Amino acid sequence: MKQFIALFLSAICFLSCKKEIDTTPPLKKALNSTSPNIKRVIDSLEQHEVQIKFTQIDRKNDSIVFTDYSFQSDSNNYFYPASSVKLPVAILALEKLNSIQNFDRNTTFYVEGDTIETTMAIEIAKIFAISDNKAYNRLFEFLGQDEINTRLKNKGIENVRISHRIATLNADEITTKPLIFYLNDSTTTYLKKIINTPLQSLKLNQIKKGDAHIDEDDELLNEPFDFSLKNYYSINAQHQVLKRILFPEKFSNQERFNITEKQREFILNAIQSLPKDLGYTSDEYYDSYAKFFMFGDSKKPIPANIKIYNKIGYAYGTLTDCAYIKDIDNNIEFLLTATILVNKNHTFNDDNYEYDVVGIPFMAELGRELYTSELERKK
C-alpha cells in the first residue's frame, strides 16, 4: 500500500511540476514580445506595412522539412525592395556567363563609359559585403531587364519585376550599355547593347504611398509618391530565390538556377561574408553593416558560430532583409524574410526616416526572438 501511494504521489508531481510546453506559433510569440523594439511597431502596425515570412528547418535523416509561417505576407501589397533585388541579379549574371563560351566570373570586363575594369566575381563580392550600387548596375547592364524577368519567370518565381538600376542617372533607361570582355591580353569581345521592352505600370495595392514627396527637381509636391515604375520583389519571391540557392535539391531542374556547384559555393560565401572579410575597415563597415536580423542594432562583432546568408534592402523609408540564419554550435537553422516601412511624416524622398530608432531595432529584435524560440524548440 505504501508503495502504491508513493507511485501515485510521484505521478501527481510529474503532471503538475513538469515544464509547460509553449505551443504558440513562433511568429505570434515573437510579435507578442514585451520588448519595446517590437511593441512600438505592433502598437502602430498600420503605418509600418510589416510583412514577414519565417521558415523552420528540420533535417530528418537525408530529408529536409520546411514549416512556413507568415504575418501579413501579401504579394499584392507593394513595398519598395531597394537593394534586395541585387541577389537574383547576381545569380542570373553567373547563369548567363555559363551560356557564353570562354567567359567565367574572373574574366575582366568593363562597361562602355565606365571608369574601371573589373570582374563579375569582384562586383558580386562588393554587392553582398557593402551592398555596392555601382556593382549591381554593372551586372544589370550585362543582363538587361527583359532577360532578368524572363529567367525568373521560367523558374516559377512570381510576383517580381526588376526594371531599373539603382542610385544613378537614367536608372530606368530601357537600353543597356555595351560591355567589353578581355579574353586575353590582346583579344576582346564586344557585347552589344540590349534594347528592352518599355515599362508598364504595376497594378498593386499601396503602389502610391504617403501624403507628399520630393521630386527630381527637389520640389515638395503634396501628393503621394508613385512607385508603379519601380522595382517589385515580393516577400514570397525573395524567400523562393534564397531557398533555391540554399536547397536546390528541393526543386526541379527547371526551377533551379543553372549554375555549377562551385558557383553556388561562391554565392553562398559571398552572401555570408562580412565587410572585414574583403578588407573593409570595421569602423565604417562593421559586421552587421548589411545584416539587420539579430545584430543590426549593434556594431559589435557577430559571434563566429552565427552565420547569416542574406541580402538587405534600404531606401525610401523601407527596410527589407531576406536571410538564412545558422548557428553551427547549437544546430539551429531557419529562413526569415521581413520588410517594414518607417516614415512618420508620410513624406517620401526627403531622407527623413526612422531607420535607426524604429526600423533596424525591430528587425534585430525580431531575429533575436525567433532565434531564441528555435533555441528552445525541441526537435
Image (spheres, rainbow, N blue to C red):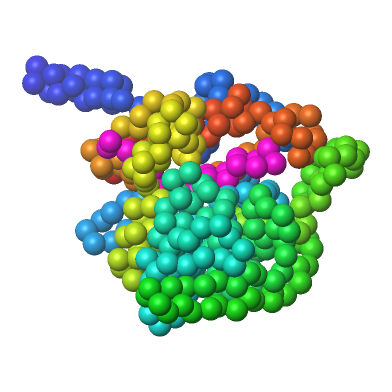
Q: Is residue 334 magenta?
A: no
Q: Viewed as shown, does residue 221 lie left or right of 128? A: right
List x then y, in percent, for residue 135.
52, 55
Of residues 21 and 288, the one drawn nearer to the viewer in this rendering: 288
List x then y, in percent, for residue 103.
40, 75
Q: Residue furthest right?
A: 222
Residue at x 43%, y 73% (from the top left corner): 182
How many numbered tags mark residues here?
0
Q: Is residue 314 magenta?
A: yes
Q: Residue furthest bottom?
A: 101
Residue at x 51%, y 58% (from the top left corner): 116
Point out the stretch of residues depicted in magenta. 304-324
> Quadrant of the rendered structure where residue 214 is?
top right
Q: Quadrant of the C terminus?
A: top left
Of residues 358 and 39, the one drawn nearer to the viewer in this rendering: 358
Residue at x 28%, y 25% (from the top left corner): 18
Q: Residue furthest top?
A: 2
Q: Is residue 218 above or below residue 75?
A: above
